[in-house]
Image (cartoon, rainbow, N blue to C red):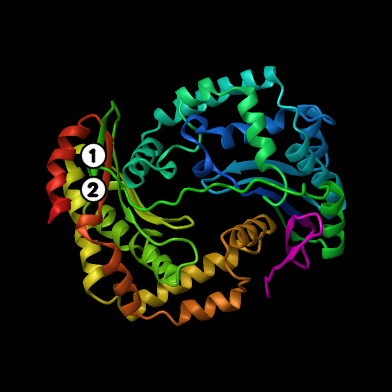
Amino acid sequence: MKREYSVKLLPNGVRLVWAPLPGRRSVSVGIWVSVGGRDESPELSGASHFLEHLVFKGTHRRTTYQIKEDVEGKGGSLNAFTGEEYTCFLAKTTAAHFRGTFDVLADMVTGATLRTEDLEKERTVILEEIKMTQDQPGQLVDEILCEVLWDGHALGRPIAGTLKTVGAMTREQIVGFRDRYYRQPHLTVSAAGDIDLIQLSREVLRAFARPPRSAPGVQRRLFSGSAATSRVRSLNKKTEQTHLCLGMHALPKDHPDELPLDLLNVVLGGNMSSRLFNEVREERGLAYDIGSSVRRYTETGAFIISAGVDGRKAPEAVGVVLKELSKIATTDVGPDELRRAKDFYLGQLDLGLENTMNLMLWAGESVLSSRSNRTLAQIRRRVEAIRPHDLKRVAARLFRTQALRLALVGPDASRLASEIRPKLSL
């Protein structure tokens, strides 16, 4: 089954992404705003996330309860998330209730009242959310690694902001942020499932008026290099485990080597058959959980390995990880292992895109990332064309000891950092 999507720029300035999925009874839809955490000034760090919360608190046409009831009362679901480069408001509903559900989403994006009393209540909620992250070492160590990787840049700041910035943010600042960005041409609507293009276009044209004659652009400062004086950062914290993140700068969005990097991720730490899982957990018992991930932004990216270990075993665990990175950068992956990685990658993509929500998110994110209109067949051809030397070439480029960054959180993190630091300078 082809799962293609088409892109159309409507007369009102909204970009439309349509991904029909015949045979489904549901429609998933998202309204994307092309602004995120990296587009905020230091004093407004967390504004996108704050605004994401606030639009659920009521509009000029609906109370917060009516927003929920108008979607959930019809059997649908409603949610939102904030990323570094965009914010997305999304819903899933039956085809029969699409119009009403989309009207709720559009009303939230364009008509939120942002009342002072709601702002103060939600400020408390977000401050508790930030504190909760600080109490979860697995998330906290990731934030610390990002600070090291993108030191001095907005990508190194937490999406939710800090206790200081969220505590000081005013209604005027948030309203100004909304009025600047929550309008065309910063809006993209993606929909997948049981909906035709004519109906979708009609609802988007109805919901959003023509754009203003001039709209301010997003002033995105590109990352050109880190000013970090240290490649290792640690935080002593009373925890049962020592949590560590080892990372390095990687490839930006739409890079020609993005798929070889994805396969490297599968081979190294993408599942329970991966090298890191087998070597660190199964063979040596150094960690309960270990894995890797890839992050991509407009002009930069990262490859990150995360684990939770007994602090006494952290240096050994890092040594094993470094050995596996060196091995894959100098020795070709075997044909059977590469075949399994390709099958896993393509199988996960195929299975995921059977779901209308996943398809909507995949198509929408692809368009916002300036990727071309790619079909599964095109991706499959590119994946099948990858050879062992492609993985080794990309690994050799990225997995260099001088490029490694490390973050540690645990009861003896500072001492462990001093012990591990020399390993990163081999």
Q: Nearer the viewer, residue 34 or 277?
A: 34
Residue 145 to residue 293: above or below:
above
Residue 337 to residue 365: above or below:
below
Q: Residue at x 80, y 54 (%)?
A: 12
Which quarter of the figure is the C terminus placed in? bottom left
Q: Residue furthest front?
A: 213
Instruction: In the rendered structure, find residue 286 and report the number of the disc placed on it.
Output: 2
Instruction: In the rendered structure, find residue 310 and report the number of the disc placed on it.
Output: 1
Give the side of residue 356 with respect to residue 273, left or right: right
Residue neighbourhood size for the residue with mark 2, other residues' Cα within 10 Å, grouped as few (<14), some (14–19), many (≥20): many
Q: Residue at x 36, y 59 (%)?
A: 250
Give the side of residue 371 with respect to residue 286, left or right: right
Which quarter of the figure is the N terminus placed in? bottom right
Amino acid on which the number 2 mark rests in the picture? Leu
Instruction: Check residue 265 for magenta coloring.
Output: no
Residue 257 x/y as whole percent? 41, 71
Q: Residue at x 76, y 49 (%)?
A: 213
Q: Nearer the viewer, residue 56 or 224?
A: 224
**Of callouts 2 and 1, the N-terminal one:** 2
Q: Looking at the rendering, which quadrant does residue 395 occupy?
A: bottom left
Q: Please report the bounds of the magenta region as a residue range.
A: 1-26
Amino acid on which the number 1 mark rests in the picture? Asp
Q: Nearer the viewer, residue 376 or 218?
A: 218
